[in-house]
Image (spheres, rainbow, N blue to C red):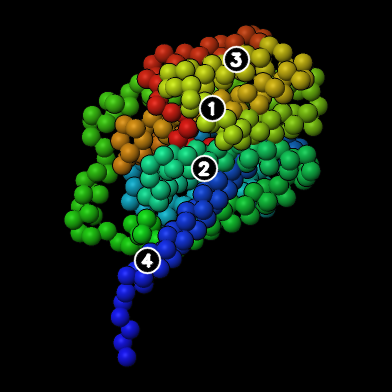
Amino acid sequence: MKRTFSFGDIVQQSRGQGTRQRRSQRLLVVGGVGLIAACYGLVRLAYGLYLPDVEAELGLDASMAGVVSGGASAMYCAAAIVGFFLAGRIPRILVAGAASTAGGGALGMALASQVEGFAAFAIVSSAGAGLASPALVELLRRAVSGDRGQRLQVVVNAGTGPGLVLAGALALLLLPDWRLAWAAAAVVTFLSAFAVLMSTALPSTALLSTVLPLSGRARRQDASAAVPPRAWFGQHLRVICAALLLGAGSAAVWTFGRTVLVDGGASGDFSALAWMCLGLGGALVLPLSAAVRRLGSTRAWMLTALVVAASTALIGLFPGVRPLALLACVAFGWGYTAATGALITWTSEIDERRASAGTALLFVVLVLGQGLGAALAGWGLGAATPGLVFVVAAALSAAAIVPARPVASIVRVP
């Protein structure tokens, strides 16, 4: 006898579907945090941490190291531009691409026997971060909406902090065996990407759009929206200027922070500990995000930029005062990570449907600012004291509050 489909069956099926949906969302968040931690903290930003030991073994000189750093930034921007156009349409493919470039690049660096091979893999590996950020923003946007979706974006974007902490821990435990450190980074990258892809493959109403093909009409609408209209770029003009200034101001710490600490008398272990403090500050975005949100949009944005500015100045002026240097590293890590979250918040408020494209655009601008700031700081260190150079960098970060219309919340989100 054929069983009648009752209301109770509908309720039970709905509950089961809700349970599967929550599981897929949790897996997506865990995998997303891991992928951001790997692509940014363990791969892209760890290059400078392991560089002295790589130089000692492979003979990577300063000029080649600079070429690699510039090439990695260019590769990141190129990948983020790809994300700008494609994240809204094929985010899962971009996740796979992020794993292939970041994880494959890290594994290639671990196995490299010649400096040329190491340099090539190091440049390619930075593409992973450029692909991962817009892809994960889009996947989370599709999976979770409303305030909860904003909170989960904060969690995922803060993955950079734990990644930096893990990179510093690997440095303390494994160096001078930098090859094993890069191999560990590759493993974390592949496992995290696998978790993200598995989460979007689980049956879930909220995630059907990531699995099923678009209808003909939806595909045409999606294609027409691939390039945002001119008004969209105009609405982003102020935040673009803010991102450029913050990127330029933060470059001094990211590029020369460890060098300044060592020149100030710090040991290699202490500089690795300072690197971990940067990551610890980034991780503090999570427990402090609710308190910052209560400050309101204007004061929250001002606080973010000013914390980056103040901590930059402290690191440059007092590198030999170790407790103060560590505290400044924690503050800088928090301020910078919170600022990247604020960028995602802002572009989502301008146009939530194009949040992935906005994230890619703003992160490209941020990295371009870092490139300009690193060049300026490098020139300045050859002509002036580190304290003066870092104070100028701090002024650029503080100036980021001028063009930026404050975001409604810093708590939305390498």
Q: Earlier in the sequence, mark 1 or mark 2?
A: 2
Q: Residue 347 location in percent, x, y?
A: 36, 32
Say which residue label 4 marks. Answer: 11
Q: Is residue 334 above or below residue 113?
A: above
Q: Is residue 121 above or below residue 248?
A: below
Tags 4 and 3 touching, CB below 8 Å: no
In the picture, measured across the screen, residue 150 lies left or right of residue 283, that is: left
Q: Earlier in the sequence, mark 4 or mark 2?
A: 4
In the picture, measured across the screen, residue 263 lies left or right of residue 366, that is: right
Q: Residue at x 67, y 47 (%)?
A: 182
Query: Which amino acid type is shown beneath numbered disc 3?
Result: Ala
Disc 4 packing (10 Å; few <14; some 14–19; many ≥20) = few
Query: Which amino acid type is shown beneath numbered disc 1?
Result: Ala
Instruction: Give the secondary structure at mark 4.
Output: helix
Q: Earlier in the sequence, mark 2 or mark 3?
A: 2
Q: Residue 4 location in percent, x, y?
A: 30, 80
Front-most of residues 413 and 148: 148
Instruction: Give the secondary structure at mark 2.
Output: helix
Foreground label between 1 and 4: 4
Q: Residue at x 51, y 46 (%)?
A: 128
Q: Residue at x 40, y 21 (%)?
A: 406
CA gap, disc 1 to disc 3? 20 Å
Say which residue label 1 marks. Answer: 291
In the picture, measured across the screen, residue 131 lies left or right of residue 57, that is: left
Q: Residue 156, labelled with which disc?
A: 2
Disc 3 packing (10 Å; few <14; some 14–19; many ≥20) = many
Front-most of residues 106 and 116: 106
CA gap, disc 4 to disc 2? 32 Å
CA gap, disc 4 to disc 3? 55 Å
Q: Residue 310, labelled with which disc?
A: 3
